[in-house]
Image (cartoon, rainbow, N blue to C red):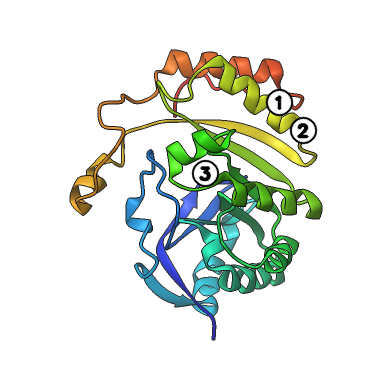
Amino acid sequence: MIKGRIHSIETMGLVDGPGIRTVVFLQGCQLRCRYCHNPDTWRLKGGKEMTVDELVKIVKRYKIYYKNKGGVTLSGGEPLLQPQFVLEFFKRCKEEGIHTTLDTAGHGCGDKKLFKEILQYTDLVLLDIKALDEKGYFKLTGGSQKEALEFLDIVQEVGTPMWIRHVVVPGINDNEENIVKLAEFVNNLSNVEKCELLPYHVHGIKKYKELNIKYTLEGIKAMDEERFIYLNNILAKHLNIPHKVPSKVI
């Protein structure tokens, strides 16, 4: 019986995919993103063990709300660190007629064949693009961009629809050049439905103090609303797909 380690479950999510969603945060992540607001998901052995049957039972309680492509999103942590659990859970969701979304940075250190199989049962991939070059990627995450790009190639090959996400941090990547490069990067992909800029915020700093982990972006303020809207306008100007410019920072 396959079990997964679950950090937490959000039952009425509105931002991690289309419609109303149950968002399941899986435990474990090998990246150490400097802006991560959930450092309590990093430890691979944390969280609560659950079987696929147990999780499906929870998800089905909210099926009545999954209209207009609502459904289930597996997030983290990094879901691909538990690929067998993700595969079996998504299979069951599809049997129940539930829309499936995978929220990932593409870092699973796993079997590429298995990832392809997971994508056969995935309706949407939310892919977090941390940075657009190896140096910037390592500086922000402590990891290598190579694995994320390999996963992106697999998504392209399978043809699973994608939403691209990119966190914008003041003083690090909130410049026009970076946003134009992001647009060019997305324009070269074949199956992107949406590209989102996510504003840096400071909501998770308290967790770092509680876990006695150094917060390396100490002193950087949350994303300025005017600047954020300006960068979204730059993105909209250069993207080949429609981009809705937000009226405020959410």
Name the mark nearer the viewer: 3 or 1: 1
Q: Which residue is mark 2?
A: 188
With 181 as the anchor, is 15 left or right in this view?
left
Q: Is residue 1 above or below residue 127?
A: below
Q: Which numbered disc, 2 or 3, marks the residue that appears first in the sequence?
A: 3
At a point 51% along the width and 17% down the height, the residue shown is: 175
Amino acid at dot 2: Asn
Quadrant location, the N terminus: bottom right
At a point 52% along the width and 64% down the height, the residue shown is: 81
Disc 3 packing (10 Å; few <14; some 14–19; many ≥20): some
Q: How far across and down, in percent of the image, does residue 48 sit?
A: 37, 72
Q: How far across and down, in percent of the image, does residue 129 sit?
A: 57, 39
Q: Nearer the viewer, residue 59 or 206?
A: 206
At a point 54% along the width and 17% down the height, the residue shown is: 231
Mark sitting on residue 19: none
Amino acid at dot 1: Glu
Let me know if residue 121 appears in the view.
yes
3D distance between C-alphas at marks 2 and 3: 28 Å
Q: Are marks 1 and 2 in contact (CB under 8 Å)?
A: yes
Q: How far across and down, in percent of the image, does residue 46 sit?
A: 34, 67
3D distance between C-alphas at marks 1 and 2: 6 Å
Q: Which numbered disc, 3 or 1, marks the residue that appears first in the sequence?
A: 3
Q: Quadrant of residue 100?
A: bottom right
Name the element at disc 3: loop
Q: Which residue is mark 1?
A: 184
Q: Which residue is mark 3?
A: 14
